[in-house]
Every structure is written in C-alpha cells, then in structure tokens.
Amino acid sequence: MGSQEVQLSSGIQPRERGTGSDLLNRIGWTPLLRLERLVPEAESAELWAKAEWHNPSGSVKDRAALAIVRAALQRGQLGPGRTLVDATSGNTGISYAILGTVLGFRVRLVLPADVNLERRRILTALGAELVWTDPMQGMDLAIDTARDIAAREPGAFYADQYSSDANWRAHYDGTGREIMSQTAGRVTHFVAGLGTTGTFVGTVRRLRTAGLRVHCAGVIPDSPYHGLEGLKHLPTAHVPAIWDARLADELLPVRTEDAYAMVREAARCEGLLVGPSAAAALVAARRLMERDGPGVYVTVLPDSGLKYLSDPLLGLDATEDRLSEARPPESHTAGDRTPKDRAPQGGGEP
Ligand SMILES: Cc1ncc(COP(=O)(O)O)c(C=O)c1O
C-alpha cells in the first residue's frame, strides 16, 4: 500500500466526522492519506493528501456549499419555494443539487457548455435545472449570467460562491482545523489549487491564525486555456472577491499535460485515481519537495478521477484499444463488449 492514514502521537482520533445517519453530517473530516511513492527518491519529505472524494457528493465542494446554504437558511434567503442560483463548473452544483433535495429548495445552475459528460449526467440525475453558456468565455460568462438570472427572478437566492465568506470559512472551520489535528501540527508546506480560492484562503487563514510556520503555495493552470477543471488562471480571469493574495507565499503554474500524466502516475503507483486538479496539486507538491527538501507536505485532492473518464486527454481509450489488440484473436467474443460500451457518447445532453 502506498497510502495509509496518519498515526497520531497525540492520541487524537484521525477521523472525527459525524457518525450518525444524517447525510449532511458526513461532510468534512476526510481521511488524510500518506503518499509514499510520489515523493522524489532523494528526499526524506512526507507527502499527505486530504481525500475529498469521501464527502457525500464526491468532492471538496460539499464543504463550501453546505456553509453557503446554512448561512442563507439562517438569513431566510432559502427555503421551500425558493431557488438557489449559482455559476459552477460542476462540483459545487452537484453539492447544491443534493442539498436542495435534502433541505427542500430548487437549484438552478449556470455552466459553460463544455462541462463533461459525467457531470452533465450526474446533475441531470439529481434534478438540477441547467443553464448553459458559451464555453469559449469560460466561467466568467457563467458567473455574469447567474448574477443576471438571480436579479431578474423573484425568490431567487444568488449563492455567489466566488464572493461568499461562508465558502472560505467552511475551510477555516473544517479543512484547516482537520489538517492541524491530523498532522498533530507538523505541517510545514501546504499546497492547494485555486478555483473560487475558498479551500486555500480558509485553510491558510486557519494555519496562520494558529501561529504555524507553513509555506503556502497556490496552484494555478499555466495558461488561460487549460483542461484543469475547477482551477482558475488568476492572472487573466475575474479574481474572486474572497481571494487574498497576501496569504500565498507563491503561485505554482502547472501545465494541463503534466497534470494528466500525474492522473495516470498516481493511479498506477499510489492506487489513487484522482481528478486533474488533484493531479495538478500533486505535480506542484512534488516540485516543492524537490526544491525545499525534508518537511511535512500537505495537499488537498478535490475529487476522484471517476467524473473524468470520458476525457480524451486521459488517453484511456487508446489504452483500451492497445489492450484489445494485444489479446489473442479467439478471445474477441461478442461478450467482450456490449453494444452499450460502443454507444456514441455526448448526444442528447442538455
Ligand atoms: C475539481 C475541483 N478542483 C479544485 C477546485 C477549487 O477549489 P476552490 O473553489 O475551493 O478554490 C474546485 C472548485 O470548484 C473543483 O471543482
């Protein structure tokens, strides 16, 4: 096994998440896994990663979505007959859709039309109302459109994850606190991708408030046109209102190709199939370990790779073809692939 849960000398239980039958109580207190095989050979660095796919919707965004919704419920902005509106590249929308069902409000999401097949289908299955925007204009157009819709529609609540203090506070109260507890305060480096920036801002504020001396690096795509779902190219995109540049010791740009190569490497060497933004964080963490040497490096893996399997950049179809070519001819039976396997993908989606 390349991964294992942290053993704490302090006696604190590594898992403190709720144990009841309430789905929402299962958000947060994700496992901190040790990744031993991705550490550069010469280094005695430790690499640890928060496995955020353990949240109920399968991503880190349950944390921010729950905090945003709770604050709105308290202020009377949400409830039966009300509609939550927001722009989302998918993961936050999936969290909102689940919360809407459990807590009783409608959910309308604005997404760039190039959101991948898996996310479209998950959102459709969960019953969210979907509004599509021109993918060439990225999340920025989706954000403007969501704001317009919410302003026009009576009873709509614009969740605005890019500006909501509840977003970063979820990580201040959750992710940051968990990392301090799960590493018994030994963390020396923190690396996280920047999308709304909530994960980074909240976690780093918590680490700094606790007085820990931690080098904090934000991960961004290396160019405005990239395939790192969930991450923003901050130098050219609308900067989220919650972003606080003073918290980052540095920004580490990662190439899409390097992140996708890491998706495959982490799967093969750690047994962890992670999403591209998680892989980008691992690329950046490895670069830091090579540069800074020994230390306790902690990163956040926002979701698993299961929602990206149709992405051609992963090169999985090519692998499949190579495997079938390598099989002896007699093994090519009708039962090998069902017609469903061969059905064209992508048609008829909203
Ligand atoms: C897959 C993925 N990675 C990273 C992020 C970035 O997290 P944050 O918005 O907290 O900066 C998101 C946010 O939506 C995401 O969906």
Image (cartoon, helix red, strand yellow):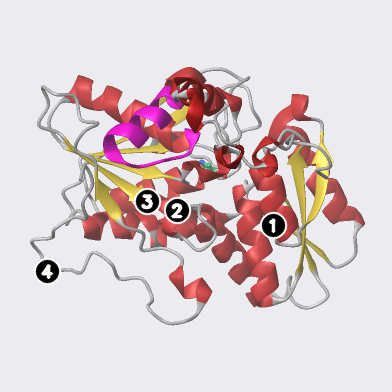
| Place of residue 142 in the rendered image (x, y in percent of width and height, measured from the top left) | 76, 39
Q: How far apart are marks 1 and 2 (CA)?
A: 23 Å
Q: Of helix, strand and loop, which mostly describes the magenta segment? A: helix
Q: Distance between the residues labelled 1 and 4?
A: 39 Å
Question: What quarter of the picture does the C terminus occupy?
Answer: top right
Q: Mark 3 points at which residue?
A: 51
Q: Which residue type carries mark 4?
A: Gly
Circle 3 residues within 10 Å: few <14, some 14–19, many ≥20? many
Q: What element carries label 3?
A: strand
Q: Residue at position x 23%, y 46% from top?
A: 3
The residue under label 2 is which amino acid type? Answer: Trp
Q: What kind of element bears circle 4?
A: loop
Whether residue 104 sits left or right of residue 221 in the image: it is right
Tell me: residue 321, above or below residue 74.
above
Per the image, the residue denoted by label 1 is 159
Separation (CA) of disc 1 from disc 3: 25 Å
Q: In which quarter of the image is the N terminus?
A: top left
Which residue is disc 2 drawn over? 53
Q: Do the residues labelled 1 and 3 touch (CB within 8 Å)?
A: no
Q: Residue at x 83, y 75 (%)?
A: 81
Is ligand 1 within 8 Å of the beta carbon of the residue shown at mark 3?
no
- Residue 136 drawn at (x, y percent): 76, 24
Instruction: Write down the region rendered in magenta.
Output: 259-276
**Residue that extends furthest to the front in the rendered view of this protein:** 330
Q: Does the residue labelled 2 lie within 8 Å of ligand 1?
A: no
Magenta-colored stretch includes residue 188:
no
Give the mark nearer the N terminus: 2 vs 4: 4
10 Å neighbourhood of mark 1: few (<14), some, or many (≥20)?
A: many
Mark 1 vs mark 4: in front = 4
Residue contact at pointers 1 and 2, CB within 8 angstroms: no
Q: How many labels does the image show?
A: 4
